[in-house]
Image (cartoon, grey):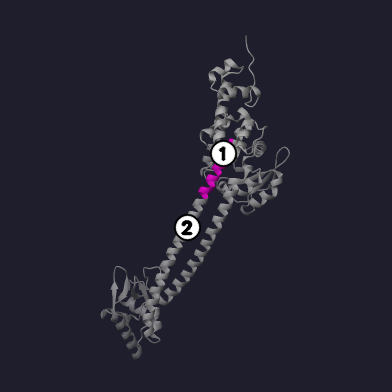
Amino acid sequence: MNIIKATITGNDSLSKRILLDIDNGAKVSEIPTLYPITLDQAKKLSQFKKMLDLMKQNLGEEYYNRLQLLGIKSLPLSSLFRQADWGGIIEILSVVTEETTRDELQLLITALKMKRERIQEFKEEADVTLSELEDTDKSLRAKEKELIRLSKEINGKMSMFNKYPEPFRSFLAEYLGLYEGELVLAKRLNVNWQRSLLKEAIIVYNKMLYMFFIKDLSSFVESLMSRHKRGLEYRWNPDQDIKRITKSTPWEDVPYNGKYRVPTSFSDSLVNSINEVNHKLEEIQNKKLATEHEFKKMKNKIVQSYMEMAETSDYLSTRDIKRHKELQDKALKWLFQRGFIAVTELTLPNGKKVDIFAYNESQIVIFEIKVSQGDLTTDQKWMDYLPYCHEFYLLTPSDLKMTAALKIKEVNCGQYVETANSIKLIRPDERIVKQVNYDDKLKFTAGQLLSRKFIYGY
């Protein structure tokens, strides 16, 4: 004789009696002989009781009552109990009601996972951004330190010239340069005088560096003053000196301005080098201030965005999950009717997952669906989708139309809104995209994903 088995929920009177027996030591295998339920139902009640016991031990009465209200519909939460994920359990139980179905609970668990993945992804991207700003700041500080050192070194050398009267002081600042702390010729002198200085070893030529080093500054200045007093030329005169050089060494390439190529960041004369150093120092300091400002701004933005992402309960709304699926279905039908091959949840080469990826003979289109204000305003990862499509569209319910329009304005992407039975174009994608990254690979991946869903159902 077949006995009709009872339907149990976990909080009906029969379930409560069985839970009490289990609590008093009854074996699960014995329950089907005492009550009109199957062994599988008894196992579910036993598992439910373990979850209730853990809830009582670790969380407050409010969440215990919420779990009890769900009954055995709450069994999909068992994985969170095994992981002692009390934060996740609290977050899900905070939005459930007595009417929440088992399937909706499973959607909430999926949404929790997606939310956490997004927060983790956001944190990783934020860490990279902050790290890059920190590296830039360190680099600028190092350059600033080096420029300050150079400035002091050049000013120190130029101060040596202060004891000489004009025009000698200006001449030395114009014609002499600095290389690794030593004075060198930054510019050619009068050819005859330079040959004389070389012969007297007042200057020395380094063949490896192609540079003339000043070995005796006092003798150099003494010779300079002597020529000046006698009315002899000592400055570079390109019209005369180039002829003199090419006459003895016709193969030599001599620049008209007479400057030597000193192998240093500041290869000009001392007077020009100090001006360049000061200019670069000012430039670096301005960049450093801008970087510090950007660093503080980014940190504040990251903290604010993270708090919004972590605290907004919209992400765990069963209504939003259902609405997302509704908009996704409408978009897929719209794309199919226009000759596109479309697939959901495709992972791009950069690791980001898109809501809808579609393509035809000439175009690749990506749709990102947003159904809540919180999700729309805080999520930025869709910006990373742009290199992988010819056209990108934000699809939202009509009440988010204005928010979405502001979101995409700066990047000239497209926008669709939901209608009663389909979707409607609000703004076309105005970007000019000639080439999509990995287009053939993306189409192949989409085809594989469609095949897997057809064969295995997921």
Residue wearing tag 2: 134
Q: Name the residue at 58% across, 50% down.
A: 305
Numbered circle sitting on residue 88: 1
Q: Name the residue at 56% across, 56% down.
A: 300
Return the x and y of residue 368 as percentages of the image width and height: 62, 43
Relative side of 104 to 171, left or right = right
Compared with 415, 22 (above or below) is above
Return the x and y of residue 86 as percentages of the image width and height: 55, 38
- Queried whether the magenta region covers residue 395, the answer comes back as no
Return the x and y of residue 434 as percentages of the image width and height: 57, 49
Tell me the quarter of the picture where residue 262 sits: bottom left
Q: Name the residue at 48% across, 55% down.
A: 132
CA gap between label 1 and label 2 equals 34 Å
Q: Secondary structure at mark 2?
A: helix
- Which range of residues does the magenta coloring cover? 109-125
Q: Nearer the viewer, mark 1 or mark 2?
A: 1
Contact between marks 1 and 2 (CB within 8 A): the answer is no
Most distant residue in the bottom direction: 230
Judging depth in this view, the residue of 323 and 196 nearest the camera is 323
Instruction: Identify the amino acid type marked 2.
Output: Glu
Relative side of 18 to 424, left or right = left
Tell me which label, 1 or 2, sits earlier in the chain. 1
Most distant residue in the top direction: 1
Dominant SS in magenta: helix
Q: Secondary structure at mark 1?
A: helix
Instruction: Identify the amino acid type marked 1.
Output: Gly
The crowding category of the residue bearing disc 1, from other C-alpha atoms within 10 Å (few below 14, some 14 to 19, many at least 20), is: some
Return the x and y of residue 88 as percentages of the image width and height: 56, 39
